[in-house]
Image (cartoon, grey):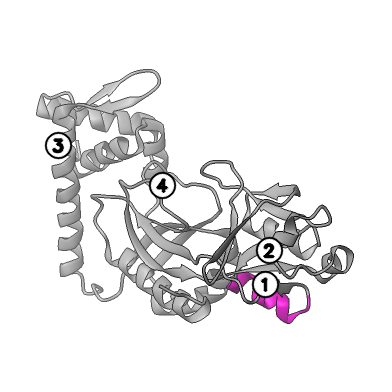
Amino acid sequence: MDRFDALQAFVRVVEAGSFTKAAQTLEISKTTVTQLVQQLEARLRVKLLNRTTRQVNVTADGAAYYERAVRLLADLEDADTSLSTASAAPRGRLRVDVPTPFARLILAPALPEFHARYPDIQLHIGASDRMVDVIGDNVDCVLRGGDLADSSLQARRVGALQLGVYAAPGYLEQAGTPLHPSELEDPRHRVVGFLSTLSGKLRPLTLQRDDETFNVRARYVVALDDGNAYLAAGVAGMGVVWLPHYMGEPHVARGELVPLFADWHLTPMPMYLVFPPNRHVSAKLRAFMGWVDALMARHAPLVG
């Protein structure tokens, strides 16, 4: 038994909660993962995991062993890095997940810059607006906006996106240009709904002006849970949309969207880099996180 491989297999099973998922993230067979964990248990003469047909749970002994195994694997990685002549150049595969509009408009166009700076980092990028299982899917880092649902994860705030309200010129010609948010509740108007991937409910539109707050309860005929599709529906004239400025302003410049309610504002959307707890923050992850910090400061209007 290779003790390093066995430790890696055990740690991934605990984090993923599944032998199948652990095998997928380690890119080995489920049989191999099972054998490695069994060999580890036999060597230690301790039951580390309770297995049923539906789930895998860590035992009390297994939980204590997991904490030490995670630290040991992190120490081994640090030792390798400290002795490597390429320690100043982060390397290896990095799995990240970012919102689809951010991937299309900001991250992807800047990737040549990242590659030039870190040529030995191999990025696996998931572009989605879904809630990613950071631990179960073995994702190193996730960029997400809004309040965080899982307080067990580590998170680093990287700013807050300014938001604006927009509509297509054709829509405004048909429905009229609203001057106050309350006019959006008139039957002539409609909004494009955005569905939270966490709750499945519509995200509310709340605007503020001085001491006045208005919660818009407008009708909609379409609601979407993908940022790119939501933007496209607004440009197509399906209704009023509220967007981060980095998404809306390019379409304003091309005459495809018109900003509304200039004297009102929306609460900025906090943005976080989220990563697993008790997981070693590797040099490659630190490099990516620092690069994203600079990227957002340069391309997205951040406040807070």
Image quarter in which the C terminus is found: bottom left
| Quadrant position of residue 30 | top left
The residue stretch that appears in magenta: 245-255
Q: Which residue is drawn at the image coordinates 16% and 28% (left, top)?
A: 60
Q: Amino acid at mark 4?
A: Ala
Pair 2/3: label in front: 2
Q: Amino acid at mark 1?
A: Phe
Q: Which residue is drawn at the image coordinates 76% and 67% (left, top)?
A: 178
Q: Which residue is mark 1?
A: 261
Estimate the x, y position of residue 298 in percent, counting from the top left.
48, 81
| 227, 124: nearer the viewer | 227
| 107, 203: nearer the viewer | 203
Q: Tag 1 or tag 3, which sits nearer the N-term?
A: 3
Estimate the x, y position of residue 224 in percent, counting from the top left.
67, 49
Task: Compute the Cα span from label 1 to label 2.
Answer: 7 Å
Q: Tag 2 or tag 4, which sits nearer the N-term?
A: 4
Q: Tag 3 or tag 2, which sits nearer the N-term?
A: 3
Pair 4/2: label in front: 2
Disc assigned to residue 231: none
| 51, 165: nearer the viewer | 165
Task: Compute the Cα span from label 3 to label 4.
Answer: 28 Å
- On screen, residue 270 above or below 11: below
